Image (cartoon, helix red, strand yellow):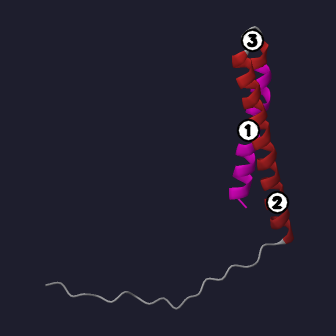
Amino acid sequence: MAKETEPEKHTEVHTHAPPTEAQVRAREAAVGSMVSASLMAVAGTLIFAWALRTPDYPWLFAVGALPWVVGVITFGRALWRYTRL
């Protein structure tokens, strides 16, 4: 039979330094960008939905695509900055 081993006890305590003022501002800016981007994507989705109801105006799809694409790209960039802080 194999001997049972006791798990090693770690006495190290990991403490994190409090975030700096610049990090706090960067996180707030990233979250603000995410909220704005989400609202733009919602606006684009609503325009898409309106375009589906009125097929007489195909240019509404392009109009709806603009805020949606910008919102998705802005959200992606903000998420990237938020996770890399």
Left or right, residue 27 beside residue 12: right
Label 3, label 1: how many angstroms apart (C-alpha)? 24 Å
The amino acid sitting under disc 2 is Glu
Identify residue type, mark 1. Answer: Ile
Between 79 and 55, the one lying in front of the other is 55
Q: Secondary structure at mark 2?
A: helix
Single out the residue that lies furthest toward the left. 1
Q: For residue 61: magenta?
A: no
Mark 3 lies on residue: 58
**Discs 3, 1 touching: Cβ within 8 Å:** no
Q: Nearer the viewer, residue 56 or 23?
A: 56
User: From mark 3 to mark 2, how far is it between C-alphas?
Assistant: 38 Å
Dividing the image into 4 quarters, which one contains the C terminus?
A: bottom right
Q: Which residues are magenta?
A: 62-85
Q: For numbered disc 3, what is the local secondary structure?
A: loop
Above or below, 31 against 58 in this view is below
Amino acid at circle 3: Pro
Which residue is the site of mark 1? 73
Residue shown at the point (72%, 38%) measured from the top left = 72
Q: Residues within 10 Å of mark 1 (few under 14, many from 20)?
A: some
Is residue 84 on the magenta stretch?
A: yes
Q: Which residue is mark 2?
A: 28
- Which SS class for mark 1? helix
